[in-house]
Image: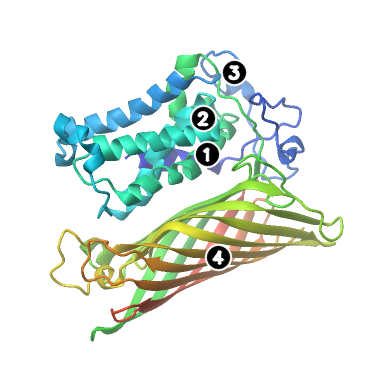
């Protein structure tokens, strides 16, 4: 419920362009400096610019300027309030059996064996990172640095798994609620500051921990603003065709998803090209999309058989970057370390990854157009892919120990290309490739180990109608091939075609 409300508010926040005021003095934490991109920002001269009359915007509660001191107790109590509240709600309102922890169980926490869990996919890979991000943002809102905030989220996650649940400590939760919390929390922390430029309530909605820390410290959150480099909202309609080939005599399955409606919001925080910074997530890309429509009639659950759904969170943030001068002065280059957090949940795909790696980004400015391209190579510290035999409803006698996805590790490759003209036309290609190896011991006897190769190729074209509105066509090809050690292999092909209207707000 927390995350659903957050997504709704985030869409409202990002639908409206964060105004950039060139003369505005940027407040910073002591020891932090504004990025070159933020310092050079100025209002865009286009009809898509949205401004606000300060006279009609209510003022935020009175608070003093931030003195930069670290408030450890405010951070700790803010995180404890969230985790304690969740535990109390689950135990005393919902009466969840897994919360019936006693002293004997908690005092022998060191004897608890870690295991993979079988929780709902959305819970494990969206709600858990968001829960951890609240602890992380409690630290950041109390002026703790990134490492201290990450440590706070990790301690909270460890405490939850070992002292607040009777279930075995979850291997996957320990990773996604700490490492995932850093990726999600740092992006939300920065977007909360940007939202303050529209209305202080929106900033609190994105980072609710500020309600606690600012009341405790009586100081406003401090940091740089005016860093939104690109912002767009898209509405699309489309259709999807899929072919899945299975072993064990199941043969080939053909599916048609006749129609769906999709909403997508895209944020580029600071210019990806020519970026030079030691500040983690001083530059990141974030895409959040949701689709709903008519299903194919196949699938394990009754909902999957009648309802098409596709929810995606695709992001990458630079951990540190350098901007070497390569080529002429019309070329901007970024080289550095990147962190990928991907999540896809649909009728055909359940894929996620937490992957640190390296990235090379370059923009070449021509007379009337720009060419932009990126190449990322990353190691998937922990990821998932769908367990096709379960997910497509082809297994019988399924027990509670089974889940519709498999835990994996491996490699991730991201390649992006975009050609855009000064008039607004754009041609783009985006490829995400994964080579995933399934972990042993996932409590699923029928699931073998082996390799799963996944590729997602998206091609799109945009034609400007005005400076604000663009029309476009997009085609997405999904390919999956498995090489299991003992099980029969699976091959999946899916093609999705859609048309969209895009509002380029920044």
**Which of the two discs, 2 and 1, labels the residue nearer the N terminus?**
2
- Label disc, if present, on residue 66 of the rendered structure: 3
- Label disc, if present, on residue 332 of the rendered structure: none
Please give left or right for residue 448 compared with residue 54 in the image.
Answer: left
**Which of the two discs, 4 and 1, labels the residue nearer the N terminus?**
1
**Which of the two discs, 4 and 2, labels the residue nearer the N terminus?**
2
Image position, residue 341 (x, y; %): 48, 53
For the residues labelled 2 and 1, the Cα–Cα distance comes to: 8 Å
Residue identifier under label 1: 186
**Which of the two discs, 3 and 2, labels the residue nearer the N terminus?**
3
Label 4: state its secondary structure.
strand
Image position, residue 432 (x, y; %): 53, 66
Residue identifier under label 4: 413
Relative to residue 134, is residue 323 depicted above or below? below
Q: Quadrant of residue 100?
A: top left
Observer-nearest of 73 and 274: 73
For the residues labelled 4 and 3, the Cα–Cα distance comes to: 41 Å
Pointer 3 local density, CA inside 10 Å: few below 14, some 14–19, many at least 20: many
Label 3: state its secondary structure.
loop
**Mark 4 touching mark 1, by CB under 8 A?**
no
**Which of the two discs, 4 and 3, labels the residue nearer the N terminus?**
3
**Mark 2 touching mark 1, by CB under 8 A?**
yes
For the residues labelled 4 and 1, the Cα–Cα distance comes to: 23 Å
Residue identifier under label 2: 140
Q: Looking at the image, can residue 206 be seen?
A: no
Label 2: state its secondary structure.
helix
**Mark 3 touching mark 1, by CB under 8 A?**
no
Relative to residue 137, is residue 484 depicted above or below? below
Observer-nearest of 121 and 348: 121
Please give left or right for residue 326 compared with residue 53 in the image.
Answer: right
Relative to residue 424, is residue 450 depicted above or below? below
Q: Looking at the image, can residue 52 be seen?
A: yes
């Amino acid at each position: 419920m927390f995350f659903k409300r957050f997504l709704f508010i985030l869409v409202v926040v990002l639908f409206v362009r964060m105004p950039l005021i060139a003369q505005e003095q940027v407040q910073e934490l002591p020891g932090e400096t504004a990025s070159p991109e933020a310092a050079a920002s100025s209002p865009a001269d286009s009809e898509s610019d949205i401004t606000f009359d300060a006279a009609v915007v209510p003022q935020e509660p009175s608070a003093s300027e931030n003195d930069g001191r670290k408030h450890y107790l405010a951070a700790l109590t803010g995180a404890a309030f969230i985790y304690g509240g969740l535990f109390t709600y689950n135990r005393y309102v919902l009466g969840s059996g897994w919360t019936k922890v006693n002293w004997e169980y908690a005092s022998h926490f060191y004897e608890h064996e870690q295991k993979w869990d079988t929780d709902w996919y959305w819970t494990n890979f969206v709600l858990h990172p968001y829960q951890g991000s609240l602890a992380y943002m409690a630290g950041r809102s109390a002026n703790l640095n990134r490492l201290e905030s990450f440590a706070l989220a990790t301690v909270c996650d460890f405490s939850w798994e070992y002292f607040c649940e009777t279930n075995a400590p979850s291997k996957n939760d320990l990773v996604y609620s700490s490492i995932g919390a850093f990726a999600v929390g740092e992006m939300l922390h920065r977007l909360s500051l940007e939202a303050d430029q529209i209305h202080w309530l929106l900033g609190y909605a994105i980072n609710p921990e500020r309600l606690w820390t600012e009341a405790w410290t009586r100081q406003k959150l401090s940091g740089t603003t005016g860093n939104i480099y690109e912002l767009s909202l898209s509405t699309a309609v489309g259709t999807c065709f899929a072919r899945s080939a299975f072993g064990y005599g199941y043969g080939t399955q053909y599916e048609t998803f006749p129609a769906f409606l999709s909403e997508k919001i895209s944020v580029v925080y600071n210019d990806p090209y020519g970026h030079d910074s030691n500040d983690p997530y001083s530059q990141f890309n974030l895409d959040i999309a949701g689709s709903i429509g008519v299903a194919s009639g196949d699938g394990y659950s009754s909902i999957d058989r009648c309802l098409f759904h596709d929810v995606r969170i695709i992001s990458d943030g630079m951990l540190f970057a350098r901007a070497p001068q390569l080529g002429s002065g019309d070329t901007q280059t970024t080289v550095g370390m990147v962190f990928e957090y991907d999540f896809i949940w649909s009728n055909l795909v359940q894929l996620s990854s937490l992957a640190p790696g390296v990235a090379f980004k370059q923009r070449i400015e021509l007379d009337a157009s720009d060419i932009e391209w990126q190449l990322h190579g990353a190691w998937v510290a922990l990821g998932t892919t769908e367990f096709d035999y379960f997910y497509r409803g082809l297994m019988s006698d399924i027990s509670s120990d089974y889940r519709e996805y498999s835990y994996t590790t491996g490699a991730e490759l991201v390649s992006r290309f975009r050609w855009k003209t000064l008039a607004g036309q754009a041609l783009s290609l985006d490829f995400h490739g994964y080579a995933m190896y399934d972990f042993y011991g996932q409590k699923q006897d029928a699931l073998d180990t082996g390799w799963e190769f996944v590729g997602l190729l998206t091609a799109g074209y945009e034609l400007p109608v005005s400076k604000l509105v663009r029309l476009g066509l997009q085609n997405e090809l999904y390919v999956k091939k498995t090489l299991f050690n003992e099980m029969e292999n699976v091959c999946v092909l899916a093609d999705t075609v859609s048309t969209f209207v895009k509002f380029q707000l920044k």
